[in-house]
Amino acid sequence: MITTRNLTKVYGEKAAVNNLNLEVGDGEVFGFLGPNGAGKSTTILMLTGMIEPTSGNCLVDGIDVARNPLKAKEIIGYLPEDVGFYGNLTAEQNLDYVGKFYPMSSKIRRERIASLLELVRLKDVTQTVGGYSRGMNQRLGLAQALLNDPKVVILDEPTANLDPEGVFQFREIIRQLSEEGKTILICSHVLSEIKQVCKTLGILSQGELVARGSVEEVEKQLIEKSKIPLKIILETKETLPEIKDPNIEKIEIDGNHAVIYTQKDIRNELSDLLRKDFGIIEMHLESPALEELFLNVYRRE
Ligand SMILES: Nc1ncnc2c1ncn2[C@@H]1O[C@H](COP(=O)(O)OP(=O)(O)OP(=O)(O)O)[C@@H](O)[C@H]1O
């Protein structure tokens, strides 16, 4: 549903996005992660037709966004990081104003606005938007992004201003939109948040995609890049001998129990090595949490 081909945006001497090749499938809920300045917002601005790529292109449902920005905008719903509204109008009036730009009858528009305000829990709020909290503003932004019933929903740091209750409601809304079959791209620099709602992740660093896949696959890719050792816990029936393997960084043997620190999952090698003489009772891997791996890799970069 979303494809970028060698997508590049250069500002002055610096490539904010560098030859990005990204695929997000139909109905996928995709987390687009990266530290500050990685190029996430720049990518989103190109995906939504707000800025033009320096080279390469992006296709949304087969539409080349730079060539056909209006057609692309008809099927994309976009929530920017800081969304602005007319402070002297109510939520309903703001949505009605924006809704008039879309090709739908006034009856459909009114029905859609009513159901969206219910979805984001602003239905019974009568005050004008000028008095809204940042979280309420964000929820109204989400309703606005969904006004045209888009096939593709792009959300830039959607939970940044939400309190825990708001974050919980947001997750429920994403689940509902996903059940409706929408393709959703959520941009964030908070991995723990993304993991709650996205089945697949991509990590951008310095304008390049450095990991992509399911949460488990990305975890594996980050383990390979990370300098945090894995821990293999091994229990045998016998007292363990000295274990030699070039991947082992450190080993703590205490009788028939060993903690082996390694950069690679070498459980197969260890069982081959020990099978003959030592009955292995248990061997398991303790890998660092995904958040810890993510921070370790990107702090260094
Ligand atoms: N209009 C611009 N002119 C010059 N440089 C820019 C412009 N927009 C972005 N950049 C630079 O491009 C790089 C990527 O910025 P971008 O905002 O896309 O990152 P990001 O991943 O969205 O970061 P954040 O999480 O902080 O929003 C940064 O180095 C930024 O300074």
Image (cartoon, helix red, strand yellow):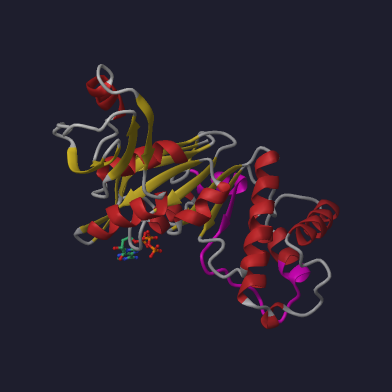
- Quarter-of-image position of residue 107: bottom right
The percent coordinates of residue 137 (x first, y second) are 64, 71
Q: Is residue 210 or residue 300 the one in the foreground?
A: 300
The residue depicted at 63 percent of the width and 56 percent of the height is 145
Left of 294 or right of it: where is 76?
right
Which residues fall within the magenta stretch? 68-94
Q: Is residue 70 or residue 121 the one in the foreground?
A: 121
The residue depicted at 67 percent of the width and 82 percent of the height is 130
Left of 293 or right of it: where is 247?
left
Which quarter of the rendering shows the C terminus? bottom left
The percent coordinates of residue 193 (x first, y second) are 52, 56
**Vertical placement of residue 103 versus 160, above or below:** above
Q: Quadrant of ligand 1?
A: bottom left
The residue depicted at 64 percent of the width and 46 percent of the height is 150
Q: Is residue 8 or residue 224 the one in the foreground?
A: 224
- Quarter-of-image position of residue 6: top left
**Vertical placement of residue 280 versus 50, above or below:** above
Q: Is residue 78 or residue 135 the one in the foreground?
A: 135
The percent coordinates of residue 158 (x first, y second) are 56, 61
Left of 301 or right of it: where is 204?
right
Q: Is residue 4 visible?
A: no
Is 240 covered by the magenta stretch?
A: no
Is 81 covered by the magenta stretch?
A: yes
